[in-house]
Amino acid sequence: MKVISVNLNGIRAAAKKGFFDWMQEQSPDIVCIQETKAQIDQLDAPVFSPPGYFRYFFDAEKKGYSGTAIYSKKEPDVISTGLGWDIADTEGRYIQADFGDLSIASLYLPSGSSKDERQLLKMEFLEKISPLLKEMAQSSRQYIVCGDWNIVHKKIDIKNFNGNKNRSGCLPEERAWLDQLFGDPPSDDAIGLCDAFRVLNKEEHQYTWWSNRGQAWANNTGWRIDYQVISPALAPLLKSTSIYKEQRFSDHAPLIMTYDRAL
């Protein structure tokens, strides 16, 4: 099973850059998209309905903003949207597809970089989603929560740690929340889900987002803020991982994982 997660920073812009051609070449079982920046009635063109895929969207109420989507080769048993609180639901930040005993979600966690009020909303979002993630970790179901989590975990996950450690996305309290999420280091209050990428790849300079300012892309001055967060039972089934950088569809790169199980 091949699963791709990518923040497209506008699905229409990414389509013009060849994203859907590349997607069909990759032939993934599931694609989880964040930041569609579109309403479904703006996506009638054939390019947005590639052959062989079902498609599902959860749009933000504000046009041209946020939004998540899932493309799947197999028709899900159930599609669900939203998490039950305002910022998650009005901004289209969570969509989940269920297949038998497996759930795959596309999550777009808020950024707090624009202003202090958004950072407070981001921290509230983390507090509210923690019990749900704990339920996932303890469930007999298997979960893959793909998405732009807008937080780096450790120094290894960002090029310029010292210069960014007091900026949203690299704040001590945000990284501590990921410590709790992954139980790394172990703690009594650990949620216990797994960072799928780091199960297989322990190397430095593995980034998924680069600022459009300066020469960030050219110099690989990046951040690893895109994850596939998985149930512990799926960790032994991981086969491969990669970050695709041969083409640029947005300021994020697609994160590709393969699992030794069927969809």
Image: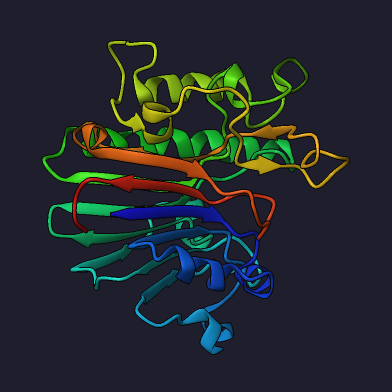
187 is higher (above) or lower (below) than 193 = above
Seen at 66% across and 57% down, the residue is 247
Report whether residue 132 is seen.
no
- Residue furthest bottom as drawn: 45
| Residue 25 drawn at (x, y percent) | 48, 68
Q: Is residue 117 left or right of residue 46?
A: right
The relative height of residue 137 versus residue 35 in the rendered view (above or below) is above
Q: Is 159 on the left or on the right of 27, as rendered?
A: right
What residue is rendered at 36% in x and 27% in y?
A: 199
Q: Quadrant of the N terminus?
A: bottom left
Indicate the quadrant where residue 173 lies.
top right
Residue 176 percent across, percent down from the top left: 49, 18
Vertical placement of residue 105 versus 44, above or below: above
Above or below, comparing residue 181 to residue 6 in the picture: above
Picture quadrant where residue 150 is located: top right
Image location (x, y in percent) of residue 183: 34, 18
Residue 188 image-quadrant placement: top left
In-image side of 185 versus 119 (left or right): left
**Of 224 and 149, which appears nearest the observer?**
224
Residue 59 spot, x, y in % from top left:
50, 69
What colour scheme does the image use? rainbow
Residue at 52% in and 80% down: 48
